Image (cartoon, rainbow, N blue to C red):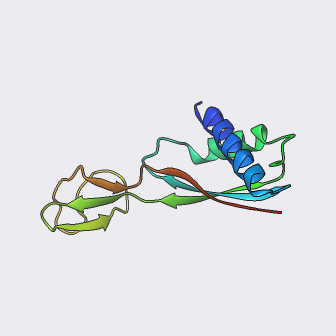
Amino acid sequence: MHELSIAQNLAELAIEAAKHTGMKRVHALHLKLGVLSGVVKEALEFSFDVVIEGTLLEGAKLIIEDIPVKVFCPACQEAHVLSEPFPMRCPVCGTKTSQVLEGREMELFSLKGV
């Protein structure tokens, strides 16, 4: 379960950022998580709750924004969001594409605290 090591890394990054900005306590972490990131959201949430015990993050909520897959269609010459990650076909014309623009990310983008 690599989600535990991801949760540990997220906690370390958040603690470092919180200390750098002078936060005494963090109430929430906001994370963008792409559908194709390979991370199981529920396992990450569980692991996060375990690794933050006894830290300035204890009690903080991990708020995850799911990022859908967005691809570029070479036939339409436009970007499209897929309702499902597979098959990787343009939802407008059906052309196969491997040009993923979004959906692989995992980004800690905000901390809320005092």
- At 54% from the left and 52% from the top, the residue drawn is 107
- Please indicate whether residue 49 sits to the left or right of residue 102 in the image: right
Image spot of residue 90 (x, y percent): 22, 62
In the foreground, 66 or 92: 66
- At 78% from the left and 42% from the top, the residue drawn is 52
Image spot of residue 14 (x, y percent): 70, 48
Image spot of residue 73 (x, y percent): 20, 61
- Please indicate whether residue 31 sits to the left or right of residue 62 in the image: left
Indicate the quadrant containing the N terminus: top left, top right, bottom left or bottom right. top right
- At 70% from the left and 43% from the top, the residue drawn is 11
Res 24 → quadrant: bottom right
- Please indicate whether residue 113 sits to the left or right of residue 1 in the image: right
Residue that extends furthest to the top in the rendered view of this protein: 1
Image spot of residue 3 (x, y percent): 60, 36
Indicate the quadrant containing the C terminus: top left, top right, bottom left or bottom right. bottom right
- At 77% from the left and 38% from the top, the residue drawn is 50
Res 111 → quadrant: bottom right
